[in-house]
Image: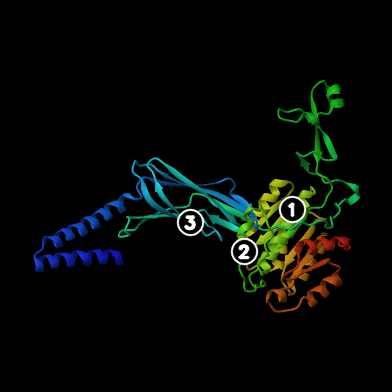
Amino acid sequence: MNATQRVVLLLLTASLLAGVVFGSPFYYRLAYVWVFLYAGSWLLSKMSLRGLEVRRTARFLRSQVGQIFEERVEVLNHTRWPKLWVEVKDESALPGSRGSQVLSMIRGGESRSYLVRTRLLQRGVFHLGPTTLVSGDLFGLFPTSRSIPAQETLLVYPMMFDIRAFPSPLGWLSGGEALRRRTQQITANASGVREYAPGDPLNRIHWISTARRNRFMVKEFELDPMAEIWIFVDANRNVHSQLPDQPAQLDEKELWRPSVKIPLPPATEEYAVSIAASLARYYLQRGRIVGLVSSGRNFRVLPAERGGRQLGKILESLALLHAEGRLPMQALVEAEIRSLPRGSTVILITPDLGDSVPLACELVLRRGMRPVVILLDVASFGGGGSIDKVSANLAMMGVPLCKVAYGDDLSSVLTENSNAQLWM
């Protein structure tokens, strides 16, 4: 029982007592008013949410940090009776969401909708809901609510930075041979011909063989002799650090901008994920073959492929990656190094300042691969230790090293290393 109900009941009791004491019919009539008000409010409250339906629709359920997420919320009244007021509460965990709104006087059979624009500030997966409808009577005696569970989820990719140039490793051409691996893509390496099958594109027909055999023949191709790129992301909880986070101050007037650059949170985890996403996009846009290895809550390996579909899989994996693992970088490399082809380039992204990184690079070198280390300066993120020892060990081994500190412009830092002699 809320305070308003107590007031009405007290007035009803006082009216009845006054009628008994003074014997005036006025007080009895006043008591009838309180009874009708109480009962009528209860009835209106029970009817206020009946026949209401909420629909939440979005054009895209995958987006990126810094972009605008648009969602339309529609409230439908399937009854013949108007709804005096309805409050729509958005209880989703999406940071910065402003989907709550109060709607008034929704007529029978009418629908009311509004557009919600949210600047995405955090990567991950978010449920679009639950949504709670709140209504009641005119006097607030009997507030009522109904919760509608979430129907869809939004996947927010990590922020990516434009890399203007970055060294591209050469292919592994032992004896000048190309990689003997068939592919459906058209490359410069034709391996043979076969009979035409329904669905084969006409530009793959080999007309000389077709004329010789008097039936359609198409060309088959092999992968280009280019080295694979493998990105290892360190998600060991024991090596990551984070400074106290302050919410980004965004101007509401800039919600019309489709995308803005938001400062990364002061955490080595977020920097590592953004670097991995940026490098994956850079190499895939240039037709390279990229794979991803990480070990957060679960050990995850994405086989090396090329194309936009591979970028989507990598971004999805990175969006869900958190520093919850226990494997150091050395163990992560040991678990997967045997399945990597000779001549691959292995990019290690880590804030680990111990011996794990040099040992992992030694394993990579022994297998005939090229290691590259992107080392996060833990001290700038509030952690302890110095990167000098790791830098000296990697320099002695001849392993290229890129240092990243908190506040660095990742686009500039990663691009500047393109001028270095990274690939021996």
Q: Please identify, in this view, whether the residue under mark 1 or under mark 2 is nearer the observer.
A: 1
Which one is earlier in the sequence, the residue at label 3 or at label 1?
A: 3
Q: Secondary structure at mark 2?
A: loop
Q: Secondary structure at mark 3?
A: loop
Q: Can you give x and y, in whole percent of width and height, for residue 288 in the image? A: 79, 50
Q: Can you give x and y, in whole percent of width and height, for residue 103 in the image? A: 43, 51
Separation of disc 1 and disc 2 at Cα? Answer: 20 Å
Give the color scheme: rainbow, by chain, secondary structure or one colour: rainbow
Vertical position of residue 397 compared to residue 309: above or below: below
Q: Please identify, in this view, whether the residue under mark 3 or under mark 2 is nearer the observer.
A: 3
- The residue that disc 1 covers is 281
Q: Residue at x 86, y 68 (%)?
A: 398
Q: Please identify, in this view, whether the residue under mark 3 or under mark 1 is nearer the observer.
A: 3
Which one is earlier in the sequence, the residue at label 1 or at label 2?
A: 1
Amino acid found under the numbered disc labelled 2: His
- The residue that disc 2 covers is 322
> Along the line of sight, which residue is nearer the eye, 32 or 137?
32
User: Dot 3, crowdedness within 10 Å: few (<14), some or many (≥20)?
Assistant: some
- The residue that disc 3 covers is 100
Which part of the image, by quadrant, shows the C terminus? bottom right
